[in-house]
Amino acid sequence: MFTQDSPLTKKILVGAHNWEWIPILVARVSLGLFFSVSGYNKLFVPERHADLINLMKEIGVPFHELMAIFLASVEFFGGLLLIAGLFSSIVAIILIIVMIVAITTVEIEHVIPKGIGPLDWLSWFIYLPQVLYIILFVWLITTGPGRFSLDYLIADKLGINDHN
């Protein structure tokens, strides 16, 4: 059963690379949907837009009204580009920066309890959804957006696609 030349042994130890397009596609499209819907709500739903402006004002962001529109636009259009798989790595880098800013300006200050030990702090930190988004974005940057993306088609047309 677990011999050196067993296909099952190979799948268990190194994975099934011919199926890796599925989680890449699901992760990219799911992240894209999340950010595009979030950005849409912050742009076009008056209560959500007002909440974002108030949060930015509360944490001391200069030009909070302009920055709210900028952030919501980055999320909305970045999400749409992720869904399409266009400029995926650039969008992922931009959204990583947005997530780092969110973690450092809002989440650490307002979500993680004060006065807890380092392991508890780490547990709270890793539990933040923004940390998971960063991990997924780094993964997408290193794997590429997958074969069902506009980036893949462009790379194919340019002759720089390695077909992995």
Image (spheres, helix red, strand yellow):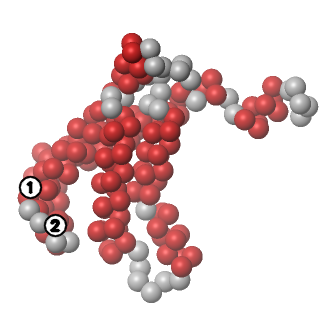
Q: How far across and how far down the image is residue 22, in percent?
A: 53, 29
Identified at 30% across, 68% down, the residue is: 106
| 78 horizontally vs 146: left or right | left
Residue 104 lies in quadrant: bottom left
* On-image quarter of the N terminus: top right
Residue type pointed to by label 1: Leu
Q: CA distance from mark 1 to mark 2?
A: 10 Å
Q: Are marks 1 and 2 in contact (CB under 8 Å)?
A: no
Q: How far across and how far down the image is residue 124, in percent?
A: 48, 70
Label placed on residue 66:
1
Q: Within 10 angstroms of label 2, few (less than 14), some, or many (20 or more) residues?
A: some
Q: Within 10 angstroms of label 1, few (less than 14), some, or many (20 or more) residues?
A: few
Label placed on residue 121:
none
| 113 horizontally vs 14: left or right | left
Where disc 2 sits, the SS reads loop
The residue that label 2 is drawn on is 61
Task: Using the image, determine if residue 29 lies above or below residue 41.
Answer: above
- Count of marks overlaid on the render: 2
Where disc 1 sits, the SS reads helix
Identified at 37% across, 72% down, the residue is: 108
Identified at 39% across, 12% down, the residue is: 157
Identified at 89% across, 34% down, the residue is: 2
Residue type pointed to by label 2: Val
Q: Residue furthest bottom?
A: 115
Q: How far across and how far down the image is residue 11, in percent?
A: 75, 31
| Residue 131 in view in this figure | yes
* On-image quarter of the C terminus: top right
| 29 horizontally vs 146: left or right | left
